[in-house]
């Protein structure tokens, strides 16, 4: 535990520490006694801040992590017999140890989406069988923004999914663990990708954008949910000292910290992508629209880079790795990785 030069890796934006402004907000909230479980001034302030971003009907329910946000949100949106249409690459499908199924009791109906984005045509493949007692009832379309593959839905794309879902009597959930990266990428406010498109519920990210921990289930249409508060408690996501979660979210969202941090992470990914493109021989497998670069690396090159940096294998079969940037990734970090990549390729 004594590495004198703490490295920044490219594995995930949650490898990063806590943004200093967020730490300051935690310290500032550490005064006296206040009521527990959300009946505190920071959580009250958070409601105003979230309404400022997402509209007057928005209600924020702070939670501890993104898996919890998704499970609470989806449970609140669906009956026991409900199902969620999502992509095969969705975090809810692949990276939550089946919590939506085990804890939420929900069925996930997946479709392949090569660039991570659902389309109405893809949703159609699973949005059927309404009224058939033999089929889990598709009730929610869940999209991830920015996607697990580092791509971004435009407002028109989100609106098309919302219009389709609503016409079918379904609701729309956005896994917004990286919603800020999508908004920064498009130069749009958060509401342009959510409220204004007709999204019903958002899992609003915090941890990946510099919080110590904390996300929020944000309900945009109260008619889309039932019992969020109860489900948050029974789902073990109700923080008793909630002021410290809320204070972080307020610090992130009240000013422009959310945007500064996300835009910086995106810019570092764009720098990395430009450097990879300049090498000229590598296959980049996805557009770089947010803070991740997906590139195929020869196994020996990946192994050499791993002596210094951590990053995820995305597809073992074809050698695709994910290189992800965070709010604190520096231009020097990126340039060092690119230099090592060029060296390793020259030797390979
Ligand atoms: C798209 C997406 N949703 C949700 C999460 C939330 O995960 P956690 O439960 O680890 O906070 C993550 C984290 O990797 C994610 O990438």
Image: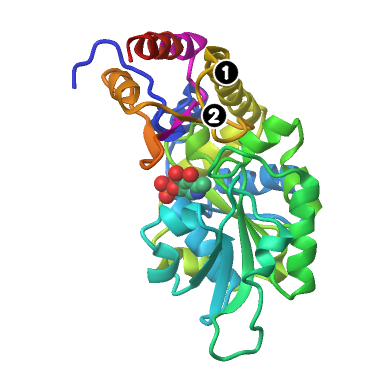
Residues marked 2 and 1 touching at CB (< 8 Å): yes
Which residue: 76% across, 69% down? 166
Rendered-image quadrant of the N terminus: top left
> Which residue corresponds to the image point at 53% horizontal and 89% vertical from the top-left?
134
Q: Regarding mark 1 in the picture, which secondary structure is present there?
A: helix
Q: Which residues are magenta?
A: 320-336
Residue 24 x, y percent position in the rendering: 48, 25
Helix, strand, or loop for circle 2? loop
**Residue located farthest toward the left when viewing the structure as drawn:** 1
From the top left corner, tell me how far across and down residue 250 is, in percent: 59, 38
Lower sequence index among marks 2 and 1:
1
Identify the disc placed on residue 303: none
Q: Is residue 37 visible?
A: no
Residue 172, position as x, y percentages in the image:
67, 62
Which residue, given by chain and number where applicable, does mark 2 sit on? Answer: 284
Q: Is residue 331 magenta?
A: yes
Q: Quadrant of the C terminus?
A: top left
* Residue 170 relative to residue 205: left or right: right
Above or below, comparing residue 33 to residue 335 in the picture = below
Residue at 57 percent across and 91 percent down: it is 133
- The part of the image, by quadrant, that contains residue 273 is top right
Label 2 to label 1: alpha-carbon separation: 8 Å
Residue position for label 1: 277
């Amino acid at each position: 535990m004594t590495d004198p030069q703490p490295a920044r890796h490219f594995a995930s934006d949650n490898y990063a520490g806590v943004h200093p402004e967020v730490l300051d907000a935690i310290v500032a909230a550490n005064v006296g006694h206040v009521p527990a479980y959300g009946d505190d001034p920071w959580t009250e302030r958070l409601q105003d801040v979230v309404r400022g971003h997402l509209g007057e009907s928005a209600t924020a329910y702070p939670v501890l992590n993104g898996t919890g946000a998704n499970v609470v949100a989806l449970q609140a949106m669906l009956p026991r017999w409900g199902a969620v249409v999502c992509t095969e690459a969705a975090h809810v499908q692949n990276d939550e140890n089946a919590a939506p199924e085990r804890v939420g009791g929900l069925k996930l109906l997946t479709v392949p989406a090569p660039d991570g984005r659902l389309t109405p045509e893809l949703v159609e493949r699973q949005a059927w069988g309404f009224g058939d007692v033999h089929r889990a009832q598709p009730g929610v379309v869940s999209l991830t923004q920015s996607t697990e593959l580092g791509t971004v839905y435009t407002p028109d794309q989100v609106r098309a999914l919302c219009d389709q879902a609503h016409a079918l009597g379904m609701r729309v959930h956005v896994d917004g663990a990286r919603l800020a990266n999508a908004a920064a990428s498009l130069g749009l406010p958060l509401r342009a990708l959510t409220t204004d498109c007709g999204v019903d519920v958002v899992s609003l990210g915090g941890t990946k954008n510099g919080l110590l921990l904390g996300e929020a289930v944000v309900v945009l249409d109260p008619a889309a949910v039932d019992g969020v508060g109860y489900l948050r408690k029974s789902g073990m996501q109700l923080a008793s000292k909630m002021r410290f979660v809320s204070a972080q979210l307020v610090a992130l969202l009240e000013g422009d910290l959310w945007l500064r941090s996300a835009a910086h992470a995106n810019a570092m990914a764009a720098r990395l992508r430009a450097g990879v493109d300049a090498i000229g021989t590598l296959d980049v497998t996805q557009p770089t629209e947010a803070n991740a670069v997906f590139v195929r690396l020869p196994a020996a090159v990946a192994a050499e880079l791993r002596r210094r940096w951590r990053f995820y294998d995305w597809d073992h079969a074809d050698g695709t790795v994910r290189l992800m940037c965070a709010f604190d990734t520096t231009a020097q970090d990126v340039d060092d990785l690119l230099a090592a990549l060029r060296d390793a390729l020259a030797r390979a």
